[in-house]
Image (cartoon, grey):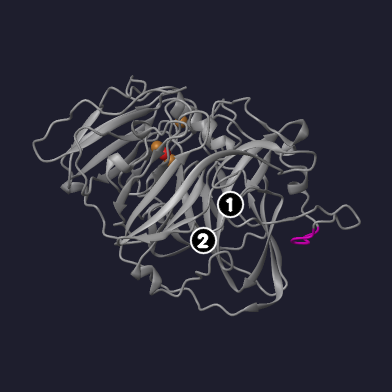
Amino acid sequence: GAASLGAGALAAAGCGTGSSAGPAGGAPVRNPLRVPPLAESAQVGGRRVFSLVAQAGRTAFVPGGEAETWGFNGSFLGPTLRVRRGEDVRVVVRNGLSEPTTVHWHGMVLPASADGTPHQTVEPGGEWSPSWRVDQPAATLWYHPHPHGATERHVHRGLAGMLIVDDDEEAALDLPREYGVDDVPVIVQDRTFGGGGAFVEGPRSGAGMLGSTILVNGTASPGFAVTAELTRLRLLNASTARSYRFGFPDGREFDVVAGDGGLLPAPVKRARLTLTPGERAEVVVRLSAGEQVVLRSYPQELGVAGADTGAADEFDVLHLGAAASLRPSAPLPARLVDVPVLDPAGAVAVRGFRMRVDRINDERMDLARVDHVVTVGTTELWDVVNVSDVPHNFHVHGTQFQVVSVGGRAPAAESAGWKDTVYAPPNVPVRLAVRFTGHADPSTPYMYHCHLLWHEDSGVMGQFVVVEPGGQARPPVGGHAHR
Ligand code: C2O
Ligand code: CU
C-alpha cells in the first residue's frame, strides 16, 4: 500500500535538491539524481562499437548498508547507449557473471540473430558481438537481459540501461536535447529493501514484485536541479511489475512528445500519463525560476479486480527544483514528425492472442516451438485480449507496431504513434497493426510476451519467425533453457 512506499519519498515538504545533510526540522534528504553516463564507443571500420560487461557488485541506495547488485560496466544499471539512424553498430557483450545471461535491445528493429533473446545466450566468461544497421526513427529504447525463465531476477538485480536513437528529423526540431541537463533519462524502478540495505526478492502479488521504495536511475529519494525553462524527461518504466501514472500535484499539464518508438505527430498535453512495465514516453515539463515540484505517481485504473497491482499506491517519483534563473528554452514546435499510419485494410492476416495467467492461447513458452510464421514486409492485425484476472501487457520484438483500437475505440493520442509495448486490460480487446520490416530469418525466432517479468518467466510468451514470401520456419537454433 501507499503507506509503505519510501517514507523519505512520501514526505512532500522540503526540497533541498542535492542536499546530503538532512535540513533541520525533519525535511527529507534528497539525493542528487544519478544520470547514467553516455557509453563510450569507438569507430572501427565505419562501425560504431560499444562494449558492455555484465558484472556483479555492491551498491548503496539507502542508509544502513549495501545491496548485492548487477550492472553493465558498473555495479547497477548500465551506461546510456546513443546511436544514430543509418549507422552500423556493434556491441561487444561480455558476461562477467557466474550464470548465463543475454542482452536484448528492447524496441530495436533488427535481425533476430542480434536481438538478444534466450536464443543468443552468453555463457559466464563468454562474449557475444551482435551488429546491425540502425534503421528506425529517433526514440527512447532500452536494453536488458532476457534469459529463459530468469529475466525478472536479472533485471531486478540491476541489469538495464537506456538506448537512445537519434535522427535528422528529431535533430531539426526545437526540442531540449542536452543530455543530463535539459534532456534527462528517468529510469523508474521499485525495490524493497531489507535490513542492511539489501534488495528483497519477493514476495509476489498477482502482478509480480511490488517494491516499497522508488529508485530513479538507481537513486532513492531523487532530486534533479532544473536549469532550463523546458526539461525533456525520457520516462522508462523499467520496473518488473509496477505500473505508474505520472503527474504533478498541482495538475499542471506537460507535453508528451514521444511514445515507445519515436516522436508523435504533435505534442499531446496531459496532466496524467500511465506507463506499464517496459513502456517509455518523452515528456516536456515547464518550470518557472525557483519553482519546486514533484513528479508523482497517482492511483490508476488498471481494470483488475482481486489482484494487488499497486494500482492504489500514490508516491513521489522525482523532485524537480528549478534554479533561481533559468536558461530560456525555444517554444515547443506545434508539429513534430509525420507518422505514417498502417492501414488495417492492408493486413494480410489476423491472429489472436489470448493472455492467461501463465500462457498465451493455451501454450506456455517453449523455446523449441515456433508459434507463428509471418512474411517479411507484410502487415498483420494482432488481436490481444487478457482473459485472466491479473494485469498483463503485450510486447513484440523486432518491430514497432501501431495500436488500431482498444475496446473497439481509437487509442488515446499519446498511444497513437509507434509502440512496442501496450497495456492489455482484462477482457478488453486490443487490436494491433504489426509490420514486419526487413529481416527474414526462418531459424531464429523473435518473442512476444507480457512485460510483467514474472509473467514472462512463467510462460506468458511465444515466438514467431519472419520468412521470405512462401518460406517456412526451420527449427530454432541456439536456444537452451537456463533457470
Ligand atoms: Cu523488454 Cu522481450 O523484452
Ligand atoms: Cu502479464
Callout 1–callout 2 Cβ contact below 8 Å: yes
Q: Is residue 394 visible?
A: no
Q: CA distance from mark 1 to mark 2?
A: 10 Å
- Mark 1 belongs to which amino acid? Phe
x and y percent of residue 183 in the render?
Answer: 54, 65
Residue 246 marker: 1
Q: Quadrant of the N terminus?
A: top right
Residue 111 sits inside the magenta stretch: no
Quarter occupied by residue 462: top left
For the point 19% across and 34% down, which residue is it?
Answer: 442
x and y percent of residue 48 in the render?
Answer: 37, 59
For the point 51% across and 48% down, which residue is it?
Answer: 161
* Towards the viewer: 366 or 335: 366
Task: Look at the magenta stretch and give its main secondary structure.
Answer: loop
Disc 1 packing (10 Å; few <14; some 14–19; many ≥20): many
Q: What residue span does the magenta drawing correspond to?
A: 14-19
For the point 45% across and 33% down, which residue is it?
Answer: 101
Residue 15 sits inside the magenta stretch: yes
